[in-house]
Image (cartoon, rainbow, N blue to C red):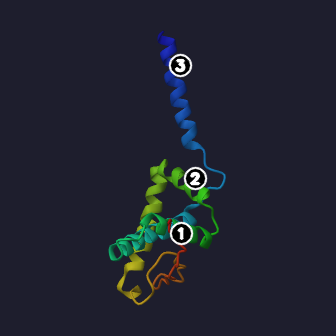
Amino acid sequence: MRWLMIAVFSFAFASCIDSRQKKPKNLLEFTPMTAVLADVLTADAVANERKYHDSLLNVNNLSAAYYQQIFKLHNISKEQFTASYEYYVNHPDEFKIVLDSVSTIINRRMSPANHSTTAGPGSQETNKSQTTLPQLKPKIKNPK
């Protein structure tokens, strides 16, 4: 019985280690993941802000439409983003670096120097002092 318990715990431990070490084949590397995640978080903020002004707006549909445009803008698929996000969540040391960079990008977007630009996700940063934020116009399908 003792050997069975040791074998079960060893197998469970080994399987946890193996799953954490595997990188998805289509993993978004640090820089692209940072850019996409910053755009996704900005899209969520924009969608929630629009909901504040229009109570009939379906935020989930709006966010989904923004996400589709963001994935198209960055030439990635939803599956690639999801697999990459799950990888980074399971690797907190790497995820912290991504989130720190995302925070820097979003803080730049919110800086007073950038208030004259159009707010919205999908930025293509040209230099550190100025960020352009094109307005995304999602195509939302409203269920009848």
1 vs 2, front mark: 1
Q: Amino acid at mark 3?
A: Ala
Task: Indicate left or right for 5 with 74 as reference.
Answer: left
On the image, the x and y values in percent for residue 59 come to: 42, 67
Task: Indicate left or right for 21 with 106 as reference.
Answer: right
Q: Return the mark for residue 7.
A: 3
Q: Amino acid at mark 1?
A: Lys
Q: CA distance from mark 3 to mark 1?
A: 53 Å
On the image, the x and y values in percent for residue 46 come to: 41, 74
Q: Nearer the viewer, residue 36 or 13?
A: 36
Q: Which residue is mark 1?
A: 141
Dots 3, 1 in contact, CB < 8 A: no
Residue at 47% x, 69% y: name it.
Answer: 62
SS category of the residue bearing label 1? loop
On the image, the x and y values in percent for residue 122 come to: 52, 75
Give the class, few, some or many, for how many residues have Cα within 10 Å of label 2's Cα (few <14, many ≥20): some
Residue at the outermost top position: 1
SS category of the residue bearing label 3? helix
Give the class, few, some or many, for how many residues have Cα within 10 Å of label 3's Cα (few <14, many ≥20): few
